Image (tube, grey):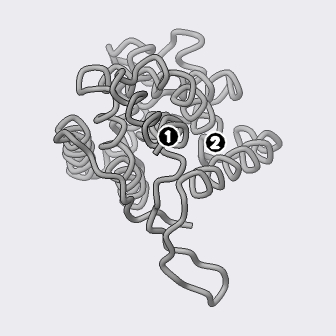
Amino acid sequence: MLPLKDDNPTETVPFITVSIIIINILVYIYQLSLGPEFERFIFTMGAIPNKIINHSCLIPKISLPAFLTIYSSMFLHGSILHIVSNMLYLWIFGNNIEDAMGHIKFILFYLICGSMAAFAHIITDIDSKIPMVGASGAVSGILGAYILLYPRARILTLVIIGFFVRLVKIPAVFVLGFWILMQFLFGMTSLTARGSSGGVAWFAHIGGFVTGFILINIFKQQRVRIRRRRRRIF
């Protein structure tokens, strides 16, 4: 299932969400401009578990402290498909979460979710020397918040099952519930193949999602609780 659009309107302009998307795109364009140095840049700025745990540097003459790569990695992507999918999810769901908590809180929420996502990946693959990059950990936090706040929001979703291809509007609880279920299944499977390849940081997705699910009740504004209560009554 690929979500394309939701029918959940916002009351404010999501300029932080838009800004994060623009920053990610600009960083990726810069990455492409590096040519042969693309991979070196990923290893320099990506979050490498072994490097962070041991406070070491795998590439000499790099001054960026290991712990800061947790944040720099959130704005790096390994491929065009990687960044397009992350930015699509951020655009669909991020505006509502920014609207629910306000612009400044949203920035903090985004960074915390991304950080906890990185730690979730690190503790499940401590010895890995493969860099983790991508906004998916932070975006996963947004998904965790969205499923709790707006479970009944209708999501226009591209459903592909064999030769069956159709656009269907599905409640967010099913779209995002299916998504997190897949992360758990693939995450458990990946435990048997640690260090064999780059792959996907499944536990970063899980860590970000759980963090967002927990923190949204702390970060959301009072008006959101009132609006949801009124929806239930009327």
Q: How far is the residue under mark 2 from the one under mark 1? A: 38 Å
Which residue corresponds to the image point at 24% horizontal and 48% vertical from the top-left? Answer: 25
* Secondary structure state at the residue bearing disc 1: helix
Task: Name the residue furthest bottom.
Answer: 163
User: Percent x, y for residue 179?
Assistant: 61, 53
- The image position of residue 85, as x and y in percent, is 42, 57
Q: Residue at x 78, y 44 (%)?
A: 193
Residue at (60, 30) in percent of width and height: 210
| Figure label count | 2
- The residue at the point 60 percent across, 21 percent down is 50
Instruction: Say few, some or many: other residues with alpha carbon within 10 Å of mark 2 (under 14 / 14 to 19 / 20 or more).
Output: many
Q: Quadrant of the N terminus?
A: bottom right
CB-based contact (under 8 Å), mark 2 and mark 1: no
Q: Is residue 4 left or right of residue 165?
A: left
Indicate which disc residue 233 carries.
Answer: 1
* N-terminal-most mark, 2 or 1: 2
The residue lying toward the viewer, choosing from 170 and 69, is: 170
Q: 122 or 215: nearer the eye?
A: 215
Q: Mark number for residue 202? A: 2
Amino acid under disc 2 = Trp
From the viewer's perspective, tell me whether residue 122 is left or right of residue 131.
right
Q: Secondary structure at mark 2?
A: helix
> What amino acid is labelled 1 in the image?
Ile
In the picture shown, does residue 162 fall above or below 82?
Answer: below
